[in-house]
Image (cartoon, rainbow, N blue to C red):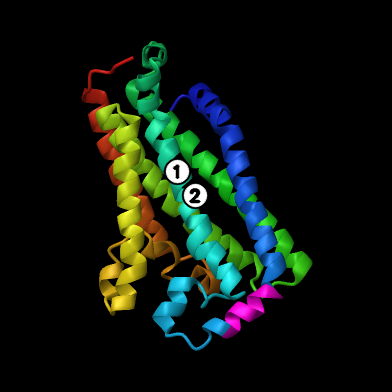
């Protein structure tokens, strides 16, 4: 991987990653701030729900309903959407915008270009995760949250790995087709289907089938209580590795546009 190219790509994504991280962090900060008051009301409303339904609405996590909504609904959807959009346009966007010829004329191989793009995506997602966790941890300290900062970090790590897996898939589809709209549509549709499988199948008593969904490995091991689950992170790493292998093969074989 070219260090100069990676630095350039990371700089290009710096603003978007910072804005996304601060936005999610601010949402988490205020969520923690109100969880002690408003959260108690929702906790009373959800305490008699079946376990599967509590998990569905995010009421069975440390910190209660509001924190659950942050980690199981709003932030996962937002960070995956960001990852899909960024991954879809990383390579295919260059072809759409007619700048691929300039990029490919640099004294680096296509593989290095691909991996520099992937590296910048990973750094951007890591920055989002750190900013999100940092503001959440600050709120937890200020408002005496029941959720420790270390467990917040574990939840954030799982969400970043989830997003990285979908970013890699989007990058692979874009590398194979050169069409960012197709890449975002295919990967976004896959993400939605996987999310529905992860959330709806347990309600139907089909918990084991939900484990086929990548979303299950984000919070299925309950990192907000037990910490980071390396086996589940390994699943995301395997998905990303497979996607990158496909991206490398297809990108090197294609006649590039732009």
**Callout 2 touching callout 1 (CB < 8 Å):** yes
Circle 1 packing at 10 Å, graded few (<14), some (14-19), many (20+), is many
Residue 16 to residue 45: above or below? above
* Residue at 71% in and 75% down: 37
* Percent of width and height locating residue 120: 49, 34
Q: CA gap, disc 2 to disc 1? A: 6 Å
Q: Which residue is mark 2?
A: 79
What count of labels does the image hold?
Answer: 2
Magenta run includes residue 19: no
Secondary structure, mark 1, is helix
Residue 176 to residue 145: above or below? above
Dominant secondary structure of the residues highlighted in magenta in the image: helix
Q: Nearer the viewer, residue 35 or 11?
A: 35
* Percent of width and height locating residue 94: 39, 22
**Residue found farthest to the right:** 142
Left or right relative to 126: residue 101: left
* Residue at 49% in and 89% down: 48
Can residue 251 be seen here? The reply is yes
Left or right relative to 11: residue 118: left
Secondary structure, mark 2, is helix
* Percent of width and height locating residue 92: 35, 27
Can residue 115 be seen here? The reply is no
Residue 72 to residue 89: above or below? below
The quadrant of the image that shows the N terminus is top left
Q: Nearer the viewer, residue 202 or 107?
A: 202
Left or right relative to 33: residue 159: left
Magenta run includes residue 37: yes
Magenta range is 36-44
Please tell me the numbered disc located at residue 45.
none
Please tell me the numbered disc located at residue 83.
1
Circle 2 packing at 10 Å, graded few (<14), some (14-19), many (20+), is many
């Amino acid at each position: 991987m070219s260090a100069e190219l990676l630095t350039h790509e990371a700089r290009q994504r710096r603003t978007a990653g910072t804005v996304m991280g601060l936005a999610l962090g601010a949402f988490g900060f205020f969520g923690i701030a109100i969880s002690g008051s408003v959260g108690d009301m929702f906790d009373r409303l959800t305490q008699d729900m079946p376990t599967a339904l509590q998990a569905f609405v995010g009421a069975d996590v440390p910190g209660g309903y509001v924190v659950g909504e942050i980690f199981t609904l709003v932030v996962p959807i937002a960070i995956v959407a960001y990852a899909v959009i960024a991954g879809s346009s990383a390579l295919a966007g260059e072809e759409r915008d007619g700048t691929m010829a300039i990029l490919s004329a640099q004294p680096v191989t296509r593989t290095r270009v691909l991996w520099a793009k992937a590296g910048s995506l990973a750094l951007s997602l890591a920055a989002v995760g750190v900013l999100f966790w940092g503001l959440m941890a600050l709120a937890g300290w200020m408002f005496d949250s029941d959720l420790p900062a270390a467990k917040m970090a574990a939840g954030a790590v799982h969400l970043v790995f989830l997003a990285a897996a979908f970013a890699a898939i989007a990058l692979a589809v874009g590398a194979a087709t050169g069409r960012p709209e197709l890449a975002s549509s295919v990967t976004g549709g896959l993400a939605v289907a996987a999310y529905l499988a992860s959330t709806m199948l347990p309600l139907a008593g089909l918990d084991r089938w939900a484990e086929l969904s990548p979303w299950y490995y984000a919070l299925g091991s309950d990192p907000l209580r037990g910490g980071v689950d390396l086996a589940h992170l390994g699943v995301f790493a395997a998905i990303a590795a497979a996607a990158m292998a496909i991206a490398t093969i297809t990108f090197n074989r294609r006649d590039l546009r732009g």
